[in-house]
Amino acid sequence: MGQPLFDIPSIPSLEIIGSDDRFPVRRIFCVGRNYAAHAAEMGNEVDREAPFYFTKAAHALVLSGAEIAYPVGTEDCHYEMEFVIAIGTPTHAVSQGAAMGAVYGYACGIDLTRRDLQAKAKEGRKPWDLGKDFDQSALMGAITPAATFGAIGDQAITLEMDGVLRQSAHLSDMIWSVPEIIAHLSGFYHLTQGDLIYTGTPAGVGPVHPGAQIKGAIAGLEPIALSIAP
Ligand code: MN
C-alpha cells in the first residue's frame, strides 16, 4: 500500500448551534422547482408527480460570512435562498411517516446558479452541472438541531441584496414537504450522516453583482450572509 500522492483534502464542516461539535458534509442534494411561484417565474410547469434533483460537490461549499469572487464562466450568476435539511441517520427507502427520523437539523443555504449556463443546458436537453455545481456555489449557514427548531410550518424565508428584499415566502409554500422529499430521495440513495438537501427556492431569484451584499433568513434559524468581491 502506497501513501496518498498528495494531502487528502479536508472535509468541509458546518457549525452547530448550541454545540462545540461540527457537522461534516458528505454530499449535497438539491431539489428543483419546489415553490410554484418560482417555477412560474422560470417559465416552467410544476411536475407534481415526483420531485427532481441535482447535486453539488461537498467541496463547492462556502461558509456564511464569506466574501467570494464573482463566479467564473458566467455573466448571470443568481442567488437562490433555500431551507436546507441536514441528515443525521442512515436512511434508505424510508416511509413518509418515518422520514423525519433521518433529520439532524436545518440551516439556511444559498444555491448560487450560473443561470446563463443552466438555460443553455436546458435548451440543449443537457445536464445542469455547469450551471449548478461549481466552485463556491453552495453557501451554508450554521445548523440548528431539529428539536430546537421544532415543527416545520409557515416560517418566513427571505433574502435581501444590498438592503432590498428580493425573496419572501413561507416554508409552507413548498410543493414537496420535508418528509416527502426525504422519503422520495431515500428510494434512490442510501442517505447518511453528513448529507445535505437544499429544498428549492421561492420566487424572486435574480442576478448578483460584484460588490453585492446578500443576506438570507429563515425564522428560527441562524441567518446567512455572502459578499461578492467588488
Ligand atoms: Mn435551487
Image (cartoon, rainbow, N blue to C red):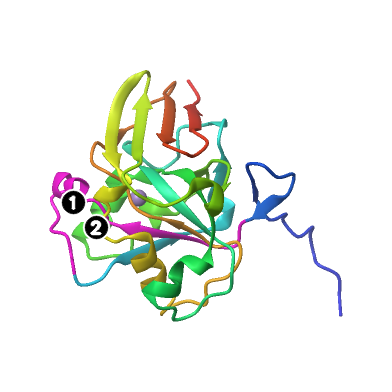
Circle 1: residue type: Ala
- 4 inside magenta stretch: no
Q: Which mark is residue 6?
A: none
Quarter of the picture containing the N terminus is bottom right
Q: Position of residue 199 (x, y in %)?
A: 37, 55
Q: Is residue 208 visible?
A: no
The residue identified by callout 2 is 175
Q: Position of residue 3 (x, y in %)?
A: 86, 70
Query: Is 164 drawn above or below residue 156 in the view shown?
Result: above
Q: Pick whichever, 164 or 5, lies toward us.
A: 164
Query: Is 54 drawn above or below residue 79 in the view shown?
Result: below
- What is the span of residues highlighted in magenta in the rendered image? 25-48
Query: Is 24 drawn above or below residue 216 in the view shown?
Result: below
Which quarter of the picture shows residue 76?
Answer: top left
Q: Pick whichever, 71 or 65, lies toward us.
A: 65
Distance between the Cα atoms at labels 1 and 2?
A: 7 Å
